[in-house]
Each structure stands twice: as C-alpha cells, then as structure tokens.
Amino acid sequence: MFIIRDGQVLTPDRGVLEGITRKTALELCALKNIKAEITPLRYEDLMTADEAFCTSTAGGIVPVAKIDQHIMSNGRPGPLSTMLREFYWKQHCAGWHVTPVSYSLSAEYIRAKSCSKLPMSP
C-alpha cells in the first residue's frame, strides 16, 4: 500500500508485506527523483491522500481511486500513480528485474506477447 500526498510517496513501516514489488516501486521512485518514504501511516493519512496505489507481483503498480468514502483524483487513477504504473511496465518489458521462465515457447516470445497488451491510461 502506498499513498501520495503533496507529490511524496509514502508506504507504511509495518503491517504490509515487504515484498519485491514494493521494493521495486521504491526503486522506481528513486529513478524518477520522487521522494519516497517508509513511515508510520494512520487511517487518517489514507483519508487525506491525493492518490494511492498498491503493488503486487502479478499486477505491478495498481492505482487506487477510492478508499472507503474518500475519492481521489476525481475517482480515476492519479497522474503520479499512472506515471509510476507505466514506468513499471516499461522497465519490466525492458527486462529490468525480470527472470524469464523458459517454457516450450521462448522467453523473448512470451515477453513480446505480454508487453504488446500493456495496460493503458484511461
């Protein structure tokens, strides 16, 4: 779980999986010179966020438009979340932090097919 407030990316210091995709999101922020911090977060922080996103192995960076009754970015993915999602998939397709699994099809063929169907901004 990540929130964005005043252009800064914040993620909880506890109570979340400290997974690889979370770490990757923090690395992407560093590459884009976006201030990111692991810090204590409260429910009130979620309710005052400008934007939010989650990370997952299968989904990468997934923007969130609403938490409870708090609607962010007019109910659509926010600009910073969207940029990070697109950057994540661009880096992924370029082979960054990717370990291909070799099946009967070549890894290059699989990557080319999956990257041709990238999620696009609404």
Image (spheres, rainbow, N blue to C red):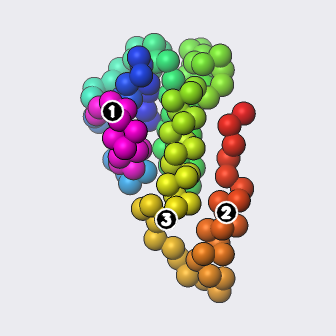
What is the C-alpha distance between the residues marked 2 and 1? Answer: 29 Å
Q: Earlier in the sequence, mark 2 or mark 3?
A: 3
Q: Residue at x 61, y 29 (%)?
A: 77
Report which residue position mark 1 lands on. Answer: 36
Q: Is residue 99 above or below residue 82?
A: below
| Mark drawn on residue 114 | 2
Residue farthest to the bottom, as pictured: 104
Query: Over which residues does the magenta segment extend?
Result: 22-38
What is the C-alpha distance between the residues marked 1 and 3? Answer: 24 Å
Q: Position of residue 67 (x, y in %)?
A: 55, 22
- Dot 3 amino acid type: Gly
Q: Residue at x 58, y 77 (%)?
A: 107
Residue mark closest to the camera, 1 vs 3:
3
Q: Position of residue 49 (x, y in %)?
A: 46, 18
Depth check: 88 or 58 in front? 88
- Is disc 2 placed on a helix, strand or loop? helix
Q: Position of residue 65 (x, y in %)?
A: 61, 25
